[in-house]
Image: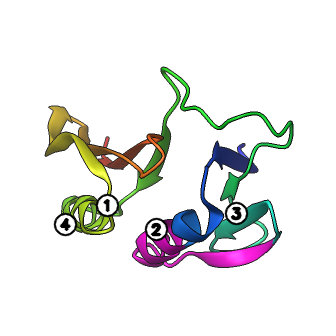
């Protein structure tokens, strides 16, 4: 249902380093891009995450209530993504843990303040 989501950044080189290393943990790579936008994913037929310098040339700012959720694949995967993000300079927004009987998640903010969730959901 989702083709791609974009996250505004202030420093493309820093964002590429952060997201390149973080998303490698779930098998994603930079698929394509140009100077102001880069797309990451596991294939062109799957959902992608794009990092971008805003097109309108206005300052990047994080949205209140906006968040990108990245599947961890397992509880261990969630824990690894959370630890990797912190290692790469993210800040903690909620340690890994069970939030609902079917939802295990962890929350961080990337170096630009964008909120990310790493999760495993089981029914």
- Name the residue at 60% across, 70% down: 13
* Labelled pair 1, 4 in contact (Cβ < 8 Å): no
* Labelled pair 2, 1 in contact (Cβ < 8 Å): yes
Question: Which tag, 3 or 2, sits closer to the chain's start?
Answer: 2
Residue 89 circle label: 1
* Labelled pair 3, 2 in contact (Cβ < 8 Å): no
Residue 4 circle label: none
User: Residue reaching furthest top?
Assistant: 64
* Spatial separation of the CA atoms under disc 2 and disc 1: 8 Å
Q: Which is in the foreground here, disc 2 or disc 4?
A: 2
Q: Mark 3 points at which residue?
A: 46
Give the extent of the magenta segment: 17-33
Could you tell me which quadrant the C terminus lies in?
top left
> What is the x, y in percent for residue 72?
35, 60
Q: Mark 2 points at which residue?
A: 18
Could you tell me which quadrant the N terminus lies in?
top right
């Amino acid at each position: 249902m989702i083709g791609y989501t974009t996250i505004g950044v202030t420093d493309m080189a820093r964002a590429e380093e952060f997201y390149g290393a973080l998303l490698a943990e779930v098998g994603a790579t930079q698929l394509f891009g140009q100077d102001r936008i880069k797309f990451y994913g596991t294939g062109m037929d799957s959902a992608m995450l794009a990092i971008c310098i805003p097109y309108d040339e206005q300052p990047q700012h994080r949205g209140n209530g906006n968040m990108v959720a990245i599947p961890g694949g397992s509880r261990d995967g969630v824990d690894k993504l959370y630890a990797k993000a912190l290692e790469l300079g993210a800040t903690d927004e909620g340690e890994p843990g069970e939030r609902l009987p079917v939802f295990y998640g962890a929350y961080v903010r990337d170096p630009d303040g964008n909120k990310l969730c790493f999760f495993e959901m089981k029914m």
